Amino acid sequence: MLKFKFDYLNNTLAYQKGKYWYEIIEEFQGSFGSQGFQLDNGWISFTLYEKQIKIFAKKESLEGNDFLNPEPAIYYRKYLPKQRPLIFTFEDKDQVEKINGRWGKKHA
């Protein structure tokens, strides 16, 4: 999984490849006041709170998601302390799924 670096004051996101960081420039305004970045195979959004940052991400299946390939997208959610830069990765324990209209841990 990729390692990301987010700076909430400058609203910048980068990913690490080898020893270098590459900035992601495609931004969008998300729901409920979040700020997001478009990735090659999904997106990441950030919601800022007083003492923490909620990170929510969607990773699309490499094969797509249609009737020929019903593999669903994978969603991740993390809450991290409000610091900068914020460096993080996603792990299996961060996966969430929507059940009865609410997001909850996939591997509870």
Image (cartoon, rainbow, N blue to C red):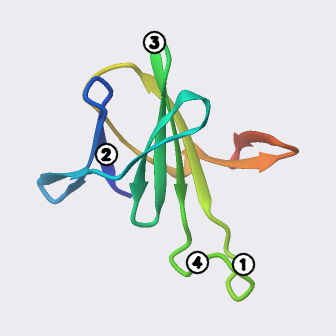
Give the mark, 3 or 2, whose residue is nearer the N terminus.
2
Q: Which mark is residue 70?
A: 1
Question: Which secondary structure, mark 2?
Answer: strand
Q: What distance separates the C-alpha of mark 1 from that of mark 4?
A: 8 Å
| Residue 11 coordinates in the image, percent (x, y) | 31, 32
Q: What distance separates the C-alpha of mark 3 from that of mark 1?
A: 39 Å
In the picture as drawn, the residue positioned furthest to the left comes out as 19
Q: Residue type at mark 4?
A: Gly
Pointer 3 local density, CA inside 10 Å: few below 14, some 14–19, many at least 20: few
Pointer 4 local density, CA inside 10 Å: few below 14, some 14–19, many at least 20: some
Q: Residue type at mark 1?
A: Pro
The answer to whether residue 36 is left or right of residue 8 is right
Give the mark, 1 or 4, whose residue is nearer the N terminus.
4
The answer to whether residue 78 is left or right of residue 4 is right
Residue drawn at point x = 31 percent, y = 20 percent: 83
The answer to whether residue 22 is left or right of residue 93 is left
Q: What distance separates the C-alpha of mark 2 from that of mark 4?
A: 23 Å
| Residue 42 coordinates in the image, percent (x, y) | 49, 60
Q: Which mark is residue 27?
A: none
Which numbered mark, 2 or 4, is in the foreground of this view? 4
Dot 3 and dot 4 residues touching (CB under 8 Å)? no
Residue drawn at point x = 72 percent, y = 78 percent: 70
Q: Which mark is residue 51?
A: 3
Give the mark, 3 or 4, whose residue is nearer the N terminus.
3
Which numbered mark, 3 or 4, is in the foreground of this view? 4
Q: Which residue is mark 4?
A: 64
Q: Residue type at mark 2?
A: Phe
Considering only vertical position in the picture, is 107 above or below 79? below
Count of residue discs? 4
Residue drawn at point x = 76 percent, y = 48 percent: 98
